């Protein structure tokens, strides 16, 4: 999950680098075909290392491919509450410990005036955790991915619905998987090398 | 596919339950009038505000839904519409408040105003005649939009004409503004003027926020009640309850945001004429109630509803809906009662019978109207989108 996959980039740029099998990518015409094939791959044929690339979010794709819910929410609440505690400690330490100064007869520290900062820092920390946590969990930014070798990769951002099966899936067998995807209605399926 | 019409047997059974509840609670509350008149009017006002705000919250979010072109709420939108169309009957419930004006509102006594420079300054607004006129205006505005939207939507059931939906969306824009203003001023008149020296510009939205919350809880409970007897089981699904749960969560936070903002600004400025209202609520056992509200109305629901699981589990969602309705009533009680019981929290048995009487009164008319049409807006073009609603 490096920021820049140097080894991967070298492999892409060097035409003589040894290639190795990475997986199979198949293209489907529409989201219904993708959902149907994904469901069959996961629920009937027992594949687990599946992924989908689509031009827009497809409802129900997680359930079809057996992708578990993201843990992002738990990361966000932990870091968000860290923000709350940071705000309390910051205001208490600066106002009541490090430089105590009575202003307008108010207490040195009180939750009444600490609350807005507690709220703001909770939101700020949560937002950062949400954005950067999402990027980290997705392995982004990522300038290279083996699926880019798929000849119709660009259509995933336009009108193609791609289903990806990785080599490290226990059920994977390059030719059989490719054939199975074609049988499930793919308009094309290719073995992709890294 | 579900049956979108109410079964007459079920309708009659529930109507009898509502009628029974109303007769018992209204008789008890009515008897309370002869026991303790002042307590009766205060309990009545709290119950009246609590119940009416539920309908007003439903009207507001109904219009917001129309304005935003919402599809997720269509399967239970007829409940909101019927609740909004029940608002005119509130004018009947308002009559005892008008009759009890001298027991409730200090500013209504001419001799008190004569010795009070502040009340003299407010007399142009706070006088019994204008108070009654304003109440009628508020109900006129609520009735106009509540009944108007209801009529358009039920007309769409029959002729499937999309113009009714467009008409409702057009109604909704000025409607949200006017209904909000009317409710805000009603909160100033009926609750804030209990302490006529005190003022807060945030009070209207604070009171309305609780109403929005209570309306989401009520919609969830009505839907769950129908689900229990097997009605609309496939139309109002986990996905719709999940969204209602999100709203309950969001409005809990919004209520806290508004009520805390009101408190914090007064705490900061520390001006006696402003802090006095909170001072009354920090006396004796009222302080415990105030502290309890922070946890019961905010911290507990916040952490309870924050996960996806509790919003999608119908048992936990129902529990939270009941809890938040109770908290909302406590909030109103906490707003009304310190004028009557300045020394501490002293719930009276009328504080339990009055809200039941008010809610069953509205429920009776709600139930009557609900049976006159399909219980789902069958003519709405967004219905099929709503039936297939799915949260990512």
Image: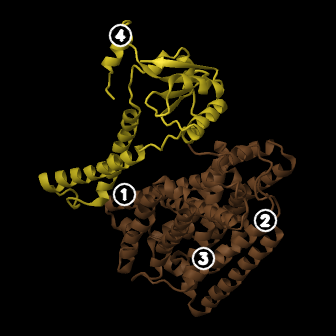
- Give the labeled residue for mark 1: B265
Quadrant in the picture for residue B141: bottom right
Q: Label 1 vs label 3: CA separation? A: 32 Å
Q: Nearer the viewer, mark 4 or mark 3?
A: 4
Which corner quadrant holds the C terminus of chain A? top left
Query: Would you say B3 lies left or right of B181 here?
Result: right
Query: Would you say A168 lies left or right of A79 here?
Result: right
- Give the labeled residue for mark 2: B369
- Give the labeled residue for mark 4: A17
Q: Residue at x 37, y 67 (%)?
A: B273
Which mark, residue B72? none
Q: Residues within 10 Å of mark 4 (few under 14, many from 20)?
A: few
Q: Nearer the viewer, mark 2 or mark 1?
A: 2
SS of the residue under disc 1? helix
**Do callouts 3 and 2 mark residues in contact (Cβ within 8 Å)?**
no
Q: Nearer the viewer, mark 4 or mark 2?
A: 4
Q: Colour of chain B?
A: brown
Quadrant in the picture for residue B385: top right
* Residue nearest the observer in this picture, A18 or B233: A18
Give the chain letter for yellow: A
SS of the residue under disc 3? helix
């Amino acid at each position: 999950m490096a920021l820049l996959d140097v080894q991967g980039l070298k492999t892409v740029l060097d035409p003589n680098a040894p290639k190795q099998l990475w997986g199979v990518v198949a293209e489907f015409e529409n989201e219904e075909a993708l959902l149907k094939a994904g469901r069959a791959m996961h629920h009937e044929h027992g594949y687990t290392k599946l992924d989908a690339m689509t031009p827009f979010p497809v409802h129900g794709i997680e359930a079809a491919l057996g992708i578990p819910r993201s843990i992002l929410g738990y990361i966000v609440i932990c870091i968000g509450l860290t923000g709350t505690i940071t705000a309390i400690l910051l205001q208490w330490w600066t106002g009541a410990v490090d430089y105590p100064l009575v202003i307008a007869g108010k207490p040195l520290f009180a939750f009444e005036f600490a609350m807005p900062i507690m709220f703001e820092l909770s939101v700020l920390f949560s937002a950062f955790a949400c954005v950067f946590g999402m990027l980290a969990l997705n392995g982004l930014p990522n300038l290279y991915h083996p699926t880019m070798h798929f000849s119709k990769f660009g259509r995933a951002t336009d009108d193609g619905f791609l289903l990806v099966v990785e080599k490290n899936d226990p059920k994977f067998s390059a030719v059989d998987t490719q054939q199975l995807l074609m049988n499930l209605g793919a308009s094309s399926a290719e073995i992709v090398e890294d | 596919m579900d049956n979108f019409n109410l079964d007459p047997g079920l309708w009659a059974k529930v109507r009898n339950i509502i009628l029974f509840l109303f007769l018992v609670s209204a008789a008890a509350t009515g008897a309370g009038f002869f026991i303790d008149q002042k307590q009766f009017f205060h309990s009545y006002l709290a119950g009246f505000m609590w119940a009416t705000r539920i309908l007003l919250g439903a009207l507001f979010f109904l219009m917001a839904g129309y304005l935003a072109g919402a599809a997720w709420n269509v399967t239970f939108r007829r409940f909101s519409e019927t609740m909004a169309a029940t608002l005119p009957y509130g004018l009947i419930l308002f009559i005892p408040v008008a009759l009890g004006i001298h027991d409730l509102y200090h500013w209504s006594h001419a001799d008190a105003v004569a010795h009070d420079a502040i009340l003299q300054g407010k007399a142009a607004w706070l006088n019994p005649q204008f108070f009654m006129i304003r109440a009628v205006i508020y109900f006129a505005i609520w009735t106009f939009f509540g009944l108007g939207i209801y009529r358009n939507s039920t007309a769409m059931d029959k002729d499937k004409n999309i113009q009714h939906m467009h008409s409702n969306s057009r109604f909704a824009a000025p409607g949200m503004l006017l209904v909000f203003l009317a409710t805000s001023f009603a909160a100033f008149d009926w609750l804030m003027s209990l302490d006529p020296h005190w003022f807060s510009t945030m009070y209207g939205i604070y009171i309305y926020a609780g109403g929005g919350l209570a309306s989401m809880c009520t919609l969830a409970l009505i839907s769950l009640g129908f689900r229990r007897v097997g009605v609309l089981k496939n139309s109002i699904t986990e996905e719709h309850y999940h969204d209602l749960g999100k709203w309950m969560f969001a409005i809990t936070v919004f209520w806290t945001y508004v009520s805390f903002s009101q408190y914090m600004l007064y705490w900061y400025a520390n001006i006696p004429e402003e802090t006095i209202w909170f001072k009354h609520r920090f006396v004796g056992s009222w302080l415990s109630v105030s502290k309890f509200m922070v946890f019961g109305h905010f911290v507990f629901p916040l952490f309870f509803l924050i996960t996806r699981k509790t919003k999608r589990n119908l048992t936990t969602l129902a529990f939270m809906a009941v809890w938040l309705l109770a908290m909302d009533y406590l909030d109103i009680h906490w707003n009304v009662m310190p004028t009557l019981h300045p020394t501490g929290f002293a719930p009276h048995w009328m504080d339990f019978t009055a809200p039941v009487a008010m809610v069953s009164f509205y429920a009776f008319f709600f139930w009557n109207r609900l049976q006159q049409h399909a219980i789902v807006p069958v003519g709405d073009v967004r219905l099929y989108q709503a039936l297939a609603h799915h949260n990512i």
